[in-house]
Image (cartoon, rainbow, N blue to C red):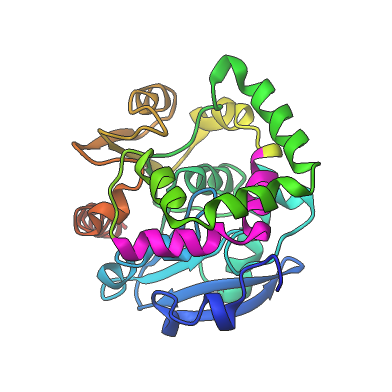
């Protein structure tokens, strides 16, 4: 059996499967979900997740917008690129290639965790020009701050050991391990969500993509460039996020123009999976306001 998630088996009952398509863009094969019509909302998931992260949000948004949600490179059912494609600028370039192939231009770009960094890098590099970028518990500052270089070196070392992703996948084969990992984010998601994460975590290829992404990540240039962001920036912060400390959003808001913070008390890192109704309401209000200003 392949180390990569396998669509005929792993994707047999994938959330919003009817909206899924497979596209060749930027030299890799993508899994992307496209639904609805109207202004374009781009949804970018976080590290080690996939399109299932939007399973309950996409149906709430698609009656009002064209929703585009890819599996990021190396994640889910999208192929693993060379390491250059797993850097932040490289991933921004690849997502841009996908959007070009689809012929879609985002009016609002939404990113969860690391996906927020990708959306911002795309906007800063001029690959997209959204009216607004939304960061859902965005991972926008270096992990561990003063220890960031150590974490990056450690991730590179782990990636260099071929048994490491298999070891992680073997550990995650126990559903209770996946459930505990998700609970440690400060979120409580439904059993369906836990099962889907566990399904991906059992695949060493999916975990290898996440590890290699971490090993090639550098957020310092993003923070350096944020003061020239032209788009509005909405930082949605879960008050119970144990992965990204909520106070990090204040640092980002202080350096990014046109930024504001919206807090979701009691919700964790996976707030959009805990309360998709609340997050959908925030996004639709923002979209309506931004489109009315054109």
**Res. 244 visible in picture:** yes
- The residue that appears at 75% across and 42% down in the rendered structure is 159
**Res. 73 visible in picture:** no
Q: In which quarter of the image is the N terminus?
A: bottom right
Please state the horizontal and vertical placement of residue 48, each as a whole percent of the image. Answer: 54, 51
- The residue that appears at 42% across and 34% down in the rendered structure is 243
- The residue that appears at 65% across and 26% down in the rendered structure is 151
Please state the horizontal and vertical placement of residue 148, each as a whole percent of the image. Answer: 62, 22
Please state the horizontal and vertical placement of residue 20, each as a whole percent of the image. Answer: 49, 79
Magenta-span inclusion, residue 171: no
146 relative to 292, above or below:
above
Q: Quadrant of the C terminus?
A: bottom left
Q: Residue furthest toward the top? A: 146
Say which quarter of the image contains residue 6: bottom right
Left or right, 170 with respect to 249, comes to right
- The residue that appears at 60% across and 79% down in the rendered structure is 22
Say which quarter of the image contains residue 235: top left
Q: For the magenta stretch, what is the residue range?
A: 191-214
Q: Pick whichever, 20 or 94, lies toward us.
A: 20
Please state the horizontal and vertical placement of residue 160, each as a whole percent of the image. Answer: 81, 41
292 relative to 38, above or below:
above
**Magenta region, mostly helix, strand or loop?**
helix
Q: Pick whichever, 198 or 139, lies toward us.
A: 198
Say which quarter of the image contains residue 253: top left
């Amino acid at each position: 059996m392949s180390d990569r998630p396998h669509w005929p088996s792993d994707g047999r009952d994938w959330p919003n499967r009817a909206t899924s398509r497979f596209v060749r863009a930027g030299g890799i094969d993508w899994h992307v979900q496209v639904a609805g019509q109207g202004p374009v909302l781009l949804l970018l998931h976080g590290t080690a997740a996939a399109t299932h992260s939007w399973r309950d949000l996409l149906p709430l948004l698609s009656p009002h917008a064209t929703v585009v949600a890819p599996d990021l490179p190396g994640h889910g059912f999208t192929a693993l690129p060379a390491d250059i494609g797993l850097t932040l600028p490289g991933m921004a370039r690849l997502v841009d290639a996908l959007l070009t192939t689809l012929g879609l231009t985002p009016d609002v770009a939404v990113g969860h965790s690391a996906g927020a960094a990708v959306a911002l890098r795309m906007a800063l590099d001029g690959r997209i020009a959204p009216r607004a970028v939304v960061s859902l518990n965005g991972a926008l500052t270096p992990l561990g701050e003063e220890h960031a270089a150590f974490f990056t070196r450690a991730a590179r070392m782990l990636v260099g050991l071929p048994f490491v992703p298999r070891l992680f996948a073997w550990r995650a084969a126990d559903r209770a391990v996946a459930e505990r990992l998700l609970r440690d984010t400060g979120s409580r998601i439904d059993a369906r969500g836990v099962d889907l994460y566990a399904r991906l975590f059992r695949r060493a290829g999916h975990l290898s993509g996440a590890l290699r992404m971490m090993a090639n990540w550098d957020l310092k240039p993003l923070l350096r460039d944020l003061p020239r962001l032209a788009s509005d920036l909405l930082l949605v912060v879960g008050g119970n996020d144990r992965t990204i400390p909520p106070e990090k959003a204040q640092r980002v808001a202080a350096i990014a123009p046109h930024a504001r913070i919206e807090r979701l008390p009691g919700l964790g890192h996976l707030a959009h999976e805990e309360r998709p109704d609340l997050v959908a309401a925030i996004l639709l209000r923002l979209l309506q306001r931004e489109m009315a200003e054109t």
